[in-house]
Image (cartoon, rainbow, N blue to C red):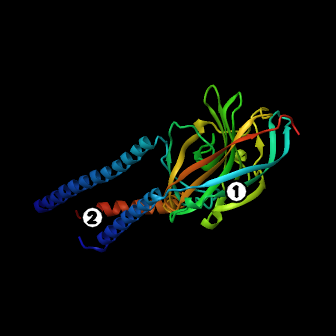
Amino acid sequence: MHSFGYRLNGLLTFSLTILTIMCAIASLSDNLNTPSPSAEIQIININRFQKQPQGNDEVSLTMNISADLQSLFTWNTKQLFIFVAAEYETPKNSLNQVSLWDAIIIAKEHAKFWIHTSNKYRFVDQGNNLRGKEFNLTLHWHVMPKTGKMFADKIVLTGYSFPEEYR
Amino acid sequence: MGWIGETVDSVKSIQMRQLLTQAVSLGMIVTSALIIWKGLMCITGSESPVVVVLSGSMEPAFKRGDILFLHMSKDPIRAGEIVVFNIDGREIPIVHRVIKVHERQDTGEVDVLTKGDNNYGDDRLLYAQGQLYLQRHHIMGRAVGFLPYVGWVTIIMTEKPIIKYILIGALGLLVITSKD
């Protein structure tokens, strides 16, 4: 009953249980945080708007993205993954979401930022439906914790549209 | 000769009962582990409710050796979700993020493109020959939570099977030789 084996077994089980409970409590503490993020995206220029040889529209654009996401950070946050996606509807597809740019924010100080960038990933439609189309730009964020449950949310910015003609 | 026979009989009978008890308790342990695993599969709706991260393609969020908890609901798949999927013909599941979604008006079926956070390009290189998008049936679940470092046990046991055999052998020995 008091051999080395039993003591080791008891110690390991107890410490594993305590570790698991601590991880769960750390994750639960994230729910106490009430975030208040804000963001703004301006499209500075549509650089290219062409139809590819395969028949799909492709767009290249430059944007100014400014955001304040500092309130999303808690002590249990490892990083914030953010990305900007264009969302629009076409006759064939009820929803299209195309990710244009993403970033990883590791420190709270960097969560308030302003960036001037062109789209990191190619904006290619499934088809050629983009002329004159209205679309939304959404800034999504994904809070990745040190341990536990991940949270994701977004801000939707409306009112953007493509030009009527290719250029 | 009589007492030899008696001793042998008594020894055999004790061994038999102890052996049977220990076999039953070992069986109970294995079955309860299986019950928990299958129960988790039912609750999370995913074939594989827990996966181990095997590559560094999602760093710094997920490092090799972390484990992910998966959940699969009927909710539509949206950009930004971290999904675990299987490519036809490949056994190892991949954990990457959805960057492009095309959802059909009529059927609600969806074409999905994924990319690892730490990779330069999207996953088209990983998909099967000629495959441009993933469909819902490729996706095993969404990652909803994670625990760091715990998956190293599985990685070590898979890459160095010797350790797996040693561990099982030692466990078996412990169960058999324990005096309770």
Towards the viewer: B73 or B32: B73
Chain ID, mark 1: A
User: What residue is shown at x 25% (from left), y 73% (from top)?
Assistant: A2
Towards the viewer: A94 or A10: A94
Q: Are marks 1 and 2 on the same chain?
A: no
* Residue type beneath disc 1: Ser
SS label for mark 2: loop
Measure the alpha-carbon separation of dots 1 and 2.
65 Å
SS label for mark 1: strand
Q: Quadrant of residue A166?
A: top right
Towards the viewer: B52 or A25: A25
**Is residue B63 visible to the viewer in this orientation of the structure?**
no
User: What residue is shown at x 50% (from left), y 56% (from top)?
Assistant: A34
The answer to whether B155 appears left or right of B42 in the picture is: right
User: What residue is shown at x 53% (from left), y 52% (from top)?
Assistant: A151
* Residue type beneath disc 2: Ser
Viewport quadrant of the C terminus of chain B? bottom left
Q: Position of residue A145 (x, y in %)?
A: 53, 59
Residue corresponding to mark 1: A66
Viewport quadrant of the N terminus of chain B? bottom left
Residue corresponding to mark 2: B178
The answer to whether B97 appears left or right of B168 in the picture is: right
Towards the viewer: A120 or B7: A120
Q: Crowding near pointer 2: few (<14 within 10 Å), some, many (20+)?
A: few
**Is residue A71 visible to the viewer in this orientation of the structure?**
yes
Q: Position of residue A153 (x, y in %)?
A: 57, 49
Q: Determine whether A6 is above or below B161 in the image.
A: below
The answer to whether A10 appears left or right of B92 in the picture is: left
Please name which of the two marks, 1 or 2, marks the residue nearer to the observer: 1
Q: Position of residue B160 (x, y in %)?
A: 53, 61
Q: Position of residue A43 (x, y in %)?
A: 77, 48
